[in-house]
Every structure is written in structure tokens, then in C-alpha cells.
Amino acid sequence: MDALQLFLDNFADWPSLMRIWPLLWQGLQLTALLAAVTLPLAILVGLMIAIVYSFHNKVLNVLLLIWIDLFRSFPVLVLLILIFYGLPFLGLKLPSFPACVLALTLNNSGYYGEIFRAGIESVPTGQREAARALGLHPLQIVFLVVLPQAIARVLAPLASNSLELVKTTSIASLVALPELLRSARVAQEQTYNPTPLTAAAVIFFVLLWPFARWVAKLERDMLMRQR
């Protein structure tokens, strides 16, 4: 019983949580804003990469594959350090929020680009040939015929990568951006116990667990369709 009470006092101290809750709430709002800005940007850049790749220009395709491989291989933490601490040496200093958005967008654009590219390549060529026979413009073929089928085929990996992106927003604490994890660490210094970190973990779990279950369902459905 003493061990349980000691655990509660250190990791689930209710008075401490009530005292620092406004700080956690502020951090949660910033985390949500960072995800809301970065997610559509990364998806849009990845989609543009895949669309350009689908026209099969040899030079452009080589450059796009270099982009995809580079940013998929580059750790996002290192990328953020280079952007936030390295660019000032070149005369360009970004505030914490834009630096985080740029790092996350560049990193995830490679993943989204590869996901969309795989989806587009999986659409049978007969679909394009039939659309050309009907007189559709190449862009009409891409947006009206190919993309709807491609997105449906890769919806599960798109959702999974989006979940990972939201979790990765916690790296913003590295550049002192007061998102949820950073706010929890500041609150920990004020309360002298790990309760704020426990609260941050619980908040992430409560918010992301339904999304994780949805991703798992999409992956099961995709496996069922492939059998």
C-alpha cells in the first residue's frame, strides 16, 4: 500500500495536476496547431511529387526519387537541428514554429510522396488508355481517373503515416517550442515530480488511440482485399 501511495504521489499527484493544467492546455493547443498546419502541407507536397512523377519524365523522376530517398533517410530530429541552428549561419533564421513545420513537412513529404507514387503506379495502365481514348486531358486523367483509385488503394498507409506525423510533433520541444511535451517538462520543474509528464502521456494516448484503432482497421481491410 505504501508503494502504491508513493507511486501516486510522484506520478499522479492531483493537486499538482490542477495547478499546472493551464500550462498543459496551452501546450496541447500548440501541438494541435502544429499538426493541423504540417499535416496538409506534407500531404500536398507528397501528392505533388507523386503527380509529377506519374508523367515519367526521366530527369524529373531521378530528381524526385533523390528527394524522396533523401528526406526519408534523414532523421527528422537532425533535420530540425540543421534548419533551426544551421540556417542562421547562411543568413536565414526561422522562428521555432516555422522551423518545426518545415522540418516535419520535408521529412514527411518523402513518405507521402512514396505512398502516393506507389498508389498511382498500382492503377492499371488500361485505365489511363481508356481515359485517353475518351479524349481526356492528361491532368484530367490524373485527377479524375487515377488519383481517386490510387488514394483508395493506399488509404491505410496514408493514415498510418499521418498518425506518426502527429506523434513526431513532440520533437518541437528540442527548439523550446512550448508544445505539449515541452510544457509538461516546464511544469515538471515547477511541481518537482513527474505528474505533468504522466498527464502528457495520457493526453496523447486518449487523443491518438481512436485514430490508431482506425488505422488498424484500415490495414486489416486492406489485407482482406488483397487475399
Image (cartoon, helix red, strand yellow):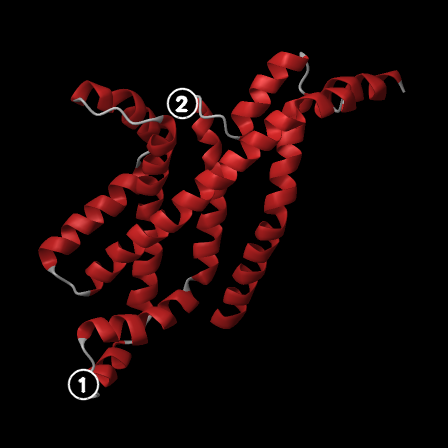
- Quarter of the figure with residue 181: top right
Residue 96 spot, x, y in % from top left: 37, 27
Q: In this view, does 218 lie to the left or right of 82?
A: right
Mark seen at residue 212: none
Q: Which amino acid does label 2 sit on?
A: Val
Q: What residue type is labelled 1?
A: Gly
Please determine whether, in this image, residue 67 is positioned above or below residue 175: below
Point 24% across, 61% down: residue: 51
Disc on the earlier residue, 1 or 2: 1
Q: Is residue 227 visible?
A: no
Which structural element holds mark 1? loop
Quarter of the image with the N terminus in it = top right
Q: Which of these two is toward me, 73 or 212?
A: 212
Point 58% across, 50% down: residue: 212
Mark seen at residue 175: 2
Tell me the residue that label 1 is attached to: 135
Residue 215 spot, x, y in % from top left: 54, 55
